[in-house]
Amino acid sequence: MPGNGPCEGVRRILFVELLGGLGDVLISLGAIQALARSYPEACLTLLTFPPGVELLEGDGFIHESVYAQPGRARDAVEDQLARGGWDLVVSDTSYDGIDALIRGSGVPRAKTNLWRSPPPDECVGERFLSLLLSDGLISEGSVAPPLLRLASEERVSAARELAGLGRPLVFLLPDAGMEVKRWPEGSWGALGRALRERHGAGIVVPVGSDEGQAGRVAELAGGTVLPRGTLRELAAALSHADLVVGADTGPARIAASLRVPTVTLFGPSWHGRYGQPPPHVNLQGHPACPQRDVSDFTRQPCWYAGVCTLEGRAWHTCLEDIPVESALSTALDLLEIGRTAARGEATR
């Protein structure tokens, strides 16, 4: 591939994102949008799982979204390749021989190794972009922070739901798909209560997989529960936040992709690789963990056990190593930056 600019003659692009998590789709969004900017005349198709399809509806850079059924990722890739006519296929997915399948399909240009040789302290999304740049598949001017797009009516509807809450408006996202990625409810409550009592913040806790958890955290924090809705409804609500604090999950990445200042709490996964880029801030639980596997946190004993397996530790998960005071001071710093920026805009 040439190294001085994107390839000519690209009219149809397929981006394969089948790692399985909502956060994975959002990590890839910067690369997807950079490809679209590099080939403005091309039609870009995204192949992913249903949650990502719903969330990226209406993205002006994605002309077609196709979803794969769970457990049938390879079949879905085969179906798309059989359509033919692809000029460029880019994939972050290699399991089930998907990478070899794409390379052997006869597509003129294919990039299936977006994960190659990643350093420990380069965020995954930025790694994707740097590799696409070095391989000459995107142009320098195409790179920008990923942006999740919402319709104005979606934001208006969310604003009505949030009317009357105090400012700054802070969303707490305590839910996580695994216990090992959860910060204690008492810590969430103490953080929200401090922000509300000391700074007049309106605290919102969206319902995730556990409605009881959201209610308990909201009660401890003196906040409001946001009922569960669609992913796009959650995104529209988050778009009105002045700050979001969340565990390392898809909703925290939704917030960052909406350009909302976000504090993300990391436990098993390494913030240097999976963190949100500045101006967002990442806080790591027990960064010196001897069992940490930066390349693949799912190989760590805690991931399978669901709790920390280190001897002599008082916590169930290393997220408990993140003090409320650290999260609070970080949150206040980001809120102050936001207030300063708003004052600057008001004086222009």
Image: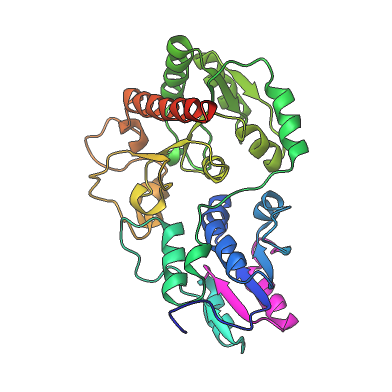
Give the colouring mode of the picture: rainbow
Whether residue 296 is in magenta: the answer is no
Residue 317 seen in the current view: no
User: In the rendered image of this protein, does residue 239 appear above or below residue 224?
Assistant: below
Q: Number of callouts in the render? A: 0
User: In the rendered image of this protein, does residue 1 appear above or below residue 317?
Assistant: below
Residue 21 screen position, x and y as percent: 56, 53
Residue 268 screen position, x and y as percent: 37, 46
Q: Which residues are magenta?
A: 66-93
Return the residue nearer the eye: 226 or 153: 153
Return the residue nearer the eye: 141 or 189: 141
Residue 146 screen position, x and y as percent: 54, 52
Please name the residue shown 50% across and 64% down the image.
141
Please name the residue shown 56% across and 76% down the image.
98
Q: Based on the displayed image, in which of its 4 quarters is residue 213 positioned?
A: top right
Whether residue 76 is in magenta: the answer is yes
